[in-house]
Image (cartoon, grey):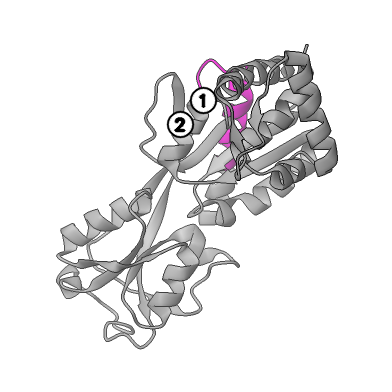
């Protein structure tokens, strides 16, 4: 029978489509990875990877076995989670999916504290688009996801974590910068930068622009909050940036100023989600509470 390790190596290749990156993600050498994959194919008596292809591609039977292997490994992780819960501590690897507009500004202190408290707990953090990560959660590719709501999916448990304020920012040379009071009408016709349409952030900026009579710049879509921050600082347009980003060391507001818009408030609801029937559900509720507490401290 295939070993758990062999299935893990095979799925790494199936997901990353690259032998070198798959070996690196599994913390083994590429020759070892290749040897184990050959051994897996020998045990199963079939070819899983089309090595004649220029790119790393699975054979039809390889694709089917990959889907079944994901389910097998998900069950194995649940077994380990049950055993860990019996020991009254968090342990193992938690595959955490999080939006890149939040992760770098929320997780560093939290992960450090949890690693110190729970020496057997490790996080595999995967940044991505929330809608795509919802599918990864349902399929078992990740265990827990954190990001802007709403998160909708079958058999998912979704809990609110916190509401994150967002502020309109401008370059220090902008004509609205330095004003003590800004009315909503002053933003009419102003141009706002955003990320690509797959992000919740894009949709929220779109709603705000419609509310304020502003314009969303579609000829430039940032790849990160940092890129938007820099473009605002250079005077290209305005932006709506989340509070954790503005307070973080990696983000900050060195190039921009907040505009004090009167009688206006913007925030985004951050939620956590996991598979409702997961054996680790109790652990994920505990982690969700820790994330909620960490955010409260950062936003205090």
Residue at point 78% right, 27% down? 38
User: Which residue is identified by label 2?
Assistant: 135
189 sits left or right of 217 in the view: left
Query: What is the chief secondary structure element of the magenta stretch?
Result: helix
202 sits left or right of 132 in the view: left
**Cα distance between the residues tagged 2 and 1:** 6 Å
Where residue 63 sits, quadrant-wise, is top right
Q: Is residue 219 above or below residue 134?
A: below
Where residue 60 sits, quadrant-wise, is top right
| SS type, badge 1 | helix
Residue at point 38% right, 81% down? 171
Where residue 76 sits, quadrant-wise, is top right
Stretch in magenta: 273-292
Return the x and y of residue 73 as percentages of the image width and height: 67, 20
- Which mark, by number, is residue 139? 1
Return the x and y of residue 155 as percentages of the image width and height: 44, 18
Residue at point 74% right, 18% down? 80
Q: Residue 67: tell me if it is visible.
A: yes
């Amino acid at each position: 029978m295939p070993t758990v390790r062999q299935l893990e190596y095979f799925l790494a290749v199936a997901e990353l489509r690259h032998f070198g990156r798959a070996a690196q993600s599994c913390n083994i050498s590429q020759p070892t990875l290749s040897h184990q994959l050959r051994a897996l194919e020998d045990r199963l008596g079939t070819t899983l990877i089309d090595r004649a292809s220029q790119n790393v591609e699975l054979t039809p039977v390889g694709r089917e076995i990959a889907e079944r292997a994901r389910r097998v490994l998900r069950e194995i992780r649940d077994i380990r989670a049950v055993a860990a819960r019996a020991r009254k501590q968090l342990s193992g690897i938690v595959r955490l999916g999080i939006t890149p507009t939040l992760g770098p500004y929320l997780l560093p202190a939290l992960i450090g504290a949890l690693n110190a408290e729970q020496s057997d707990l490790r996080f595999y953090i995967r940044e991505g688009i929330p809608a795509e990560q919802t599918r990864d959660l349902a399929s078992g590719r990740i265990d827990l996801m954190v990001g802007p709501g709403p998160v909708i999916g079958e058999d998912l448990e979704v809990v609110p974590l916190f509401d994150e304020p967002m502020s309109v920012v401008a370059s220090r040379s902008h004509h609205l910068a330095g004003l003590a009071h800004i009315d909503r009408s002053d933003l009419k016709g102003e141009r706002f930068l955003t990320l690509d349409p797959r992000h919740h952030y894009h949709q929220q900026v779109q709603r705000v622009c419609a509310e304020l009579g502003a314009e969303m710049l579609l000829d430039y879509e940032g790849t990160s909050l940092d890129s938007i921050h820099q473009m605002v600082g250079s005077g290209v347009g305005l932006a709506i940036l989340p509070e954790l980003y503005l307070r973080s060391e990696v983000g900050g507001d060195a190039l921009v100023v907040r505009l004090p818009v009167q009688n206006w408030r913007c925030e985004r609801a951050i939620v956590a989600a996991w598979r409702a029937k997961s054996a680790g559900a109790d652990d994920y509720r505990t982690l969700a509470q820790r994330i909620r507490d960490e955010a409260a401290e950062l936003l205090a």
